[in-house]
Every structure is written in C-alpha cells, then in structure tokens.
Image (cartoon, rainbow, N blue to C red):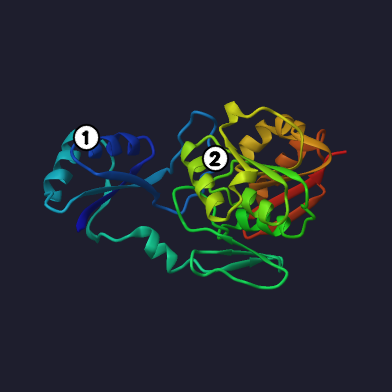
Amino acid sequence: MAWQQLTVTTDELSAPEVADYFSDIGAVSVTFMDAENEPVYEPALGETKIWSNTQVIALFELDTDLKLIKESVKQQFIDTPFKHWTEQTIADQVWERAWMEFYQPMKFADRLWVCPTDQGKVEAGTVCLTLDPGLAFGTGTHPTTALCLEWLATQPLAGKTIIDYGCGSGILAIAALLLGAEQAYAIDIDPQALTATHDNAQKNAVQDRLICVLPEHFIARQVDVVLANILAKPLIDMAGYLSQLLAPQGSLVLSGILAEQSEHVIAAYHAFVPMTSFQQKEDWVRLAGVKQ
C-alpha cells in the first residue's frame, strides 16, 4: 500500500490550525517538522511550542486529489503565508523492521550489552539486555540514555532499590536489575510507556522485581538510586521531590539536559543533592551526585 504526502511551510501561529484543517478534510496523519533547523527547548507545562517556520506534513490515501486539497487549504487560509508546497508518494513499510536495520548491539562500560532480539551477546563478565524499538522512548541510541547506561554499568548495584523516573521503554530500570539491583520502580506519565516497560521486563525475565506505576499512584519512599532521564525544566521543578526519594548516601542521576541548561539544573539541586559528576555526550549532559 502507498500514501500521498502533502507538505507546506507556514508560520508557528498558523501551523496548528492548518494541521487541524488537514485532518478535517481527510488526512490520516499530520506531523510538524522544523523548516529551518531552529532549536526548540521543552515548553512550559500546558504550552505547545513549535518552530517559527514549520513544515506541516499531511498523509492522505492514494486516491486523494492533492491539487484539490491544496486549493481548499489556500481558500480556507487566504491571509496565511504558505511556501514550499511539495507532493510525494510514500511507499508503506513495516517501520519497526526498517528501524531494526540500523539498530545494532551496543556495549556500555565493558559490562552491559543492549541488543535487539536474536542478536544477543554472550560474553564473560557482561549482561545482555534485549530491547527492540517500540512505542516508548529509550533504546540506548540517544546520548542521554547512553550516558545513564554507562553510569549504571560502572556501579555496584547488588541489593539496591532504584527508581527510574520517566522510564520510557524501561531500559534503565531493566538494566539496573540485570546488573544486580534487587528492585526497581518504573514511573512514567504515559500509560504506553508503562506497558512497554512491562513487556520489556518480561522479555528480560525481571518482571518479578519491577513495579510499573503512574506518578499519581506511586507511594513515595526512599531508595538507593534515583535516575531521571527527562528534560531540564521538569527536573528543575521536581528538585525537592526527587531528592526526597533518596536515602542518605543514595545516588541521584539526571539526564535529558542540554549542556547550556546544566548550570540551572545544578543550581536547583544544590541545596538537596550537590551534583559532583558531569559527563557530556554530543550536546547532552549527565549529572550525578550523592545525598549527604
């Protein structure tokens, strides 16, 4: 099966309305992309932030007349600035399988392998985490995830309890359990992430030691390690809360932070858990500290 794709560039005020109109007249999906390589950082809670010049990309069934769609949009938004209209036929494919061609086994700190199904590694002194691309973020390919996995693979985790806050695919919680942690709590605001985490835990035979929970259902307790690979603003907002979840001498690991945001995060945590470790990979940073 194939699809037709119609793309147009407009401004940030018009893009959401244009996207809604595409959906109203038959688009099966609509997405936004940056038209000019403009960085956008995480928005405030409840705010949707897109680019000054945004590509609105609409996918239609193959028999759709894109010329009529284009004219209808222009008539609906007479005063809206449009440029760079493009039409393209898109062949359908199994996206997860296509992604698998680029997803290969990865090794972290000579102790932890993360491998797709059927490509597991058996190597003395290492453990292997089986994980495939899916609905939730986190396969180890992104620098923030890699930074956290490298930290985990260098720690003595035997007998410890950890919290993976913003767990995504559950990769960090599952890695910690495979590396010797006794119990892990995987917390995420997205129910799909918790479903993916549970499935991945079963795949790695650690489901009996993992508890998946929405934040509002989590009963606060103190643990040995708290990992939070999310974004700078929520990390800053939750500085007091995340620090309270740590037992004395517990380790706090924060990532999802751009290098230029790191000083603000360090300042937010200074009164609770001084950040004494700073590691950078590409534009991203991992911070770590021990609660006194």
In percent of width and height, residue 284 lies at 63, 54
Q: Which residue lies under the disc numbered 2?
A: 42
Foreground: 188 or 46? 188
The structure residue drawn at horizontal position 66% and vertical position 37%, both measured from the top left corner, is 235
Residue placed most toward the observer, 212 or 60: 212
Which secondary structure, mark 1? helix
Q: CA distance from mark 2 to mark 1?
A: 28 Å
- Give me the residue at 48% from left, 50% from top: 38
Q: Position of residue 177 (x, y in %)?
A: 67, 51
Question: Residue 2: which disc?
Answer: none
Amino acid type shown at disc 2: Glu
2 or 1: tag closer to the N-terminus: 1
The numbered mark at residue 24 is 1
Q: Is residue 253 left or right of residue 290?
A: left
Q: Residues within 10 Å of mark 2 (few under 14, many from 20)?
A: few
Q: Residue 122 placed where, x, y %?
A: 62, 72
2 and 1 marks in contact (CB < 8 Å): no
